[in-house]
Amino acid sequence: FNGFVWTLVFATTTYYVKWAYSTDLTTGAVDAAKFGSLTTTLGTFQLGTTILMAAIAPALVKWFKGPLPVFKLSMWLQVIGGVGLFASMLLGVLAASPAVFFIFLTLILMGGGLGFVPGTLIGIETMDYGMYTTGKEMHAMLGAAGKFISKAQTALSSALVGAVLIGIGYQVDSVTDTFIGDLTAIPNMLRWFIIICGLIPAILSLISLFILRYYPITNEMRAKMSEAIHAMKKD
């Protein structure tokens, strides 16, 4: 569930910045200079925030003596950011203020960046747990399944954005980049983009947090697993 958040956010934010903050909604014309400035800002936020949080994640994992608390923190950031985007849209302040959009988007990006390292560690622990409980080596199979799921998440996220664009009759002049469809459809398109990159990621993160309540690997079990797997490999 949590793996969808990253792809949903990245699939929609450029569209939102373009049509919410860089377009004259009375004509459909895009201000290229403003759009270029905002996409540069967006890219800087996406890259900088992700790298920064991924860099401090190992220290937090060490501080909390395990990946699970840090992974949960990353998802709470995504919940807060996603709910903030959706609520600010409902209140009518999001479309008028790029600053509000970037504040809540940054929280989601912080969660995504922070969750990369502990998420990877949890994936490895899950493979070790399978070996610990069954006595069978399944790391390659589980790793392949994880890669397949990741590819499927990217494809489904792109399909969801495509469905929104088709649903509102998305048409853009290839030369001028002007929206030539029904201009009254743009606000509805923007609402759906915030649902996709805000509300749905928040719901998915909450589902992930609920599932992680049943995560079985404690610090004590982690030590036992390490000893048992080391003994299996020696045998």
Image (tube, rainbow, N blue to C red):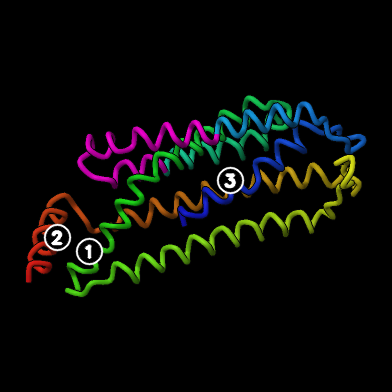
User: x, y percentage for residue 223?
Assistant: 12, 53
Q: Residues within 10 Å of mark 1 (few under 14, many from 20)?
A: many
Horizontally, residue 87 falls left or right of residue 55, namely right
Looking at the image, which residue is at 83% across and 52% down? 170
Contact (Cβ within 8 Å) of mark 1 with mark 3? no
Viewer-nearest residue: 56 or 194: 56
Q: Which residues are magenta?
A: 46-74
As for residue 113 lying within the magenta part, the answer is no
Q: Earlier in the sequence, mark 1 or mark 3?
A: 3
Q: Which residue is mark 3?
A: 9
Numbered badge on residue 143 = none
Q: Earlier in the sequence, mark 2 or mark 3?
A: 3
Res. 15 image quadrant:
top right
Q: The residue tagged with tag 3: helix, strand or loop?
A: helix
Q: Is residue 73 left or right of residue 100?
A: left
Task: Please state the horizontal and vertical placement of residue 113, each as a whole percent of the image.
Answer: 44, 40
Say which label, 1 or 2, has the lower sequence index: 1
Amino acid bearing label 3: Val
Q: Is residue 7 above or below residue 21?
A: below
Q: Quadrant of residue 87?
A: top right
Camera-side residue of 91 and 156: 156
The number of numbered discs placed on residues in the rendered structure image is 3
| Place of residue 71 in the rendered image (x, y in percent of width and height, measured from the top left) | 35, 45
Separation (CA) of disc 2 from disc 3: 36 Å
Mark 3 nearby-residue class (10 Å; few <14, some 14–19, many ≥20): many
Q: In the rendered structure, are the residues bearing label 1 and label 2 in contact, judged by CB atoms less than 8 Å apart?
A: yes
Q: Residues within 10 Å of mark 2 (few under 14, many from 20)?
A: some
Q: Identify the disc placed on residue 225.
A: 2
Compute the Cα span from label 1 to label 3. 31 Å
Disc 1 to disc 2, how far (Cα)? 7 Å
- The residue singled out by tag 1 in the image is 129
Is 39 displayed left or right of 25 in the figure? left
